[in-house]
Amino acid sequence: MSNNERYCSFCGNVILPNSKFCNACGAAVEIFEQNQATSYTYTTQTSQSSSMQEAQILGAVSIYLGIICCLIIPLLGNIVGVVLGHLSQKKGKNKFATASLALNYSLIGFFVLLALVLTLVFTL
Protein backbone atom coordinates (compact mmCIF):
# COMPACT_ATOMS: atom_id res chain seq x y z
CA MET A 1 0.00 0.00 0.00
CA SER A 2 1.39 3.42 -0.92
CA ASN A 3 1.05 6.40 1.40
CA ASN A 4 -1.51 8.11 -0.85
CA GLU A 5 -3.76 5.05 -1.24
CA ARG A 6 -7.05 5.38 0.65
CA TYR A 7 -9.99 3.06 1.14
CA CYS A 8 -13.73 3.62 1.08
CA SER A 9 -15.08 3.49 4.63
CA PHE A 10 -18.33 1.94 3.31
CA CYS A 11 -17.13 -0.97 1.14
CA GLY A 12 -13.35 -1.05 1.77
CA ASN A 13 -12.25 -0.73 -1.88
CA VAL A 14 -9.40 1.54 -2.96
CA ILE A 15 -10.46 5.11 -3.73
CA LEU A 16 -8.73 6.53 -6.78
CA PRO A 17 -6.95 9.89 -6.35
CA ASN A 18 -9.22 12.91 -6.91
CA SER A 19 -12.32 10.68 -7.10
CA LYS A 20 -15.63 12.11 -5.93
CA PHE A 21 -17.30 8.69 -5.75
CA CYS A 22 -16.15 5.18 -4.88
CA ASN A 23 -15.79 3.12 -8.07
CA ALA A 24 -17.09 -0.03 -6.35
CA CYS A 25 -20.14 1.07 -4.34
CA GLY A 26 -20.80 4.60 -5.61
CA ALA A 27 -20.64 6.23 -2.19
CA ALA A 28 -19.79 9.93 -2.30
CA VAL A 29 -16.32 10.77 -1.03
CA GLU A 30 -15.57 13.95 0.88
CA ILE A 31 -11.96 15.05 0.83
CA PHE A 32 -10.64 17.34 3.55
CA GLU A 33 -7.19 18.80 2.91
CA GLN A 34 -5.19 18.83 6.11
CA ASN A 35 -2.19 20.78 4.80
CA GLN A 36 -0.64 21.89 1.51
CA ALA A 37 1.10 18.53 1.06
CA THR A 38 -0.71 15.48 -0.29
CA SER A 39 -2.17 14.42 3.03
CA TYR A 40 -5.94 13.88 2.84
CA THR A 41 -8.62 12.43 5.05
CA TYR A 42 -11.30 10.46 3.22
CA THR A 43 -14.79 9.85 4.53
CA THR A 44 -17.80 8.51 2.68
CA GLN A 45 -21.41 9.49 2.87
CA THR A 46 -23.29 6.25 3.36
CA SER A 47 -26.80 7.51 4.00
CA GLN A 48 -27.81 7.27 0.34
CA SER A 49 -26.22 3.85 -0.12
CA SER A 50 -27.75 2.48 3.07
CA SER A 51 -31.13 3.90 2.10
CA MET A 52 -30.93 2.08 -1.23
CA GLN A 53 -29.92 -1.12 0.55
CA GLU A 54 -32.86 -0.73 2.91
CA ALA A 55 -35.19 -0.21 -0.06
CA GLN A 56 -33.91 -3.36 -1.74
CA ILE A 57 -34.32 -5.36 1.46
CA LEU A 58 -37.90 -4.11 1.86
CA GLY A 59 -38.62 -5.02 -1.76
CA ALA A 60 -37.18 -8.52 -1.35
CA VAL A 61 -39.14 -9.09 1.87
CA SER A 62 -42.27 -7.95 0.08
CA ILE A 63 -41.68 -10.44 -2.75
CA TYR A 64 -41.09 -13.33 -0.34
CA LEU A 65 -44.09 -12.31 1.73
CA GLY A 66 -46.28 -12.28 -1.36
CA ILE A 67 -45.16 -15.74 -2.42
CA ILE A 68 -45.36 -17.35 1.02
CA CYS A 69 -48.58 -15.67 2.12
CA CYS A 70 -50.46 -16.62 -1.03
CA LEU A 71 -50.43 -20.15 0.41
CA ILE A 72 -50.98 -19.34 4.09
CA ILE A 73 -53.02 -16.11 4.41
CA PRO A 74 -53.77 -15.19 0.79
CA LEU A 75 -55.30 -11.74 0.70
CA LEU A 76 -53.97 -10.27 3.94
CA GLY A 77 -50.37 -11.25 3.22
CA ASN A 78 -50.53 -9.73 -0.24
CA ILE A 79 -51.94 -6.46 1.09
CA VAL A 80 -49.00 -6.27 3.52
CA GLY A 81 -46.72 -7.08 0.57
CA VAL A 82 -48.16 -4.16 -1.41
CA VAL A 83 -47.61 -1.80 1.52
CA LEU A 84 -43.98 -2.96 1.88
CA GLY A 85 -43.49 -2.63 -1.88
CA HIS A 86 -44.68 0.97 -1.79
CA LEU A 87 -42.41 1.72 1.19
CA SER A 88 -39.50 0.20 -0.71
CA GLN A 89 -40.28 2.28 -3.78
CA LYS A 90 -40.57 5.44 -1.68
CA LYS A 91 -37.06 4.90 -0.26
CA GLY A 92 -35.59 4.42 -3.73
CA LYS A 93 -36.86 2.98 -6.98
CA ASN A 94 -35.41 -0.47 -7.50
CA LYS A 95 -36.25 -3.68 -9.34
CA PHE A 96 -37.32 -5.45 -6.14
CA ALA A 97 -39.98 -2.83 -5.40
CA THR A 98 -41.39 -2.96 -8.93
CA ALA A 99 -41.43 -6.77 -9.00
CA SER A 100 -42.98 -6.87 -5.54
CA LEU A 101 -45.80 -4.53 -6.49
CA ALA A 102 -46.49 -6.39 -9.73
CA LEU A 103 -46.55 -9.76 -7.95
CA ASN A 104 -48.68 -8.69 -5.00
CA TYR A 105 -51.21 -6.71 -7.05
CA SER A 106 -51.49 -9.65 -9.46
CA LEU A 107 -52.08 -12.08 -6.60
CA ILE A 108 -54.70 -9.80 -5.04
CA GLY A 109 -56.48 -9.60 -8.40
CA PHE A 110 -56.29 -13.37 -8.78
CA PHE A 111 -57.78 -14.04 -5.34
CA VAL A 112 -60.56 -11.50 -5.86
CA LEU A 113 -61.36 -13.05 -9.24
CA LEU A 114 -61.26 -16.53 -7.70
CA ALA A 115 -63.65 -15.43 -4.95
CA LEU A 116 -66.07 -14.01 -7.54
CA VAL A 117 -65.98 -17.16 -9.66
CA LEU A 118 -66.49 -19.43 -6.64
CA THR A 119 -69.34 -17.24 -5.45
CA LEU A 120 -71.04 -17.46 -8.83
CA VAL A 121 -70.48 -21.23 -9.12
CA PHE A 122 -71.88 -22.06 -5.71
CA THR A 123 -74.83 -19.63 -5.87
CA LEU A 124 -76.16 -20.83 -9.23
Image (cartoon, rainbow, N blue to C red):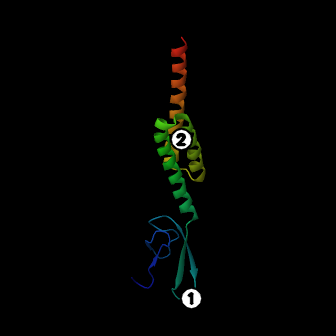
Q: Earlier in the sequence, mark 1 or mark 2?
A: 1
What percent of the width, then of the height, locates residue 15? Answer: 46, 73
What percent of the width, then of the height, locates residue 119? Answer: 55, 19
Task: State which quadrant residue 116 falls in.
Answer: top right
- Estimate how packed mark 2 is, as few (under 14), some (14 to 19) or many (20 or more) residues with alpha carbons within 10 Å: many
Residue in the picture at 47% in, 45% down: 64
Question: Which residue extends farthest left?
Answer: 1
Q: Say what amino acid the circle numbered 2 marks.
A: Leu
Residue in the picture at 50% in, 34% down: 107
From the viewer's side, name the closer residue of 67 and 38: 67
From the viewer's side, name the closer residue of 82 and 92: 82
* Figure check: 26 above or below 1: above
Residue 101, label in figure: 2
Q: CA distance from mark 1 to mark 2?
A: 53 Å
What percent of the width, then of the height, locates residue 73? Answer: 52, 37
Q: Is residue 1 left or right of residue 112?
A: left
What residue is pinned by disc 1? 36
* Figure check: 92 above or below 72: below
At mark 1, the secondary structure is loop
From the viewer's side, name the closer residue of 82 and 71: 71
What percent of the width, then of the height, locates residue 120? Answer: 54, 16
Residue in the picture at 54% in, 56% down: 54
Q: Say what amino acid the circle numbered 1 marks.
A: Gln
* Figure check: 1 above or below 55: below
Residue in the picture at 54% in, 81% down: 41
Question: Which residue extends farthest top?
Answer: 124
Q: Are marks 1 and 2 in contact (CB under 8 Å)?
A: no
| Disc nearest the viewer among 1 and 2 | 2
Task: State which quadrant residue 83 falls in.
Answer: top right
At mark 2, the secondary structure is helix
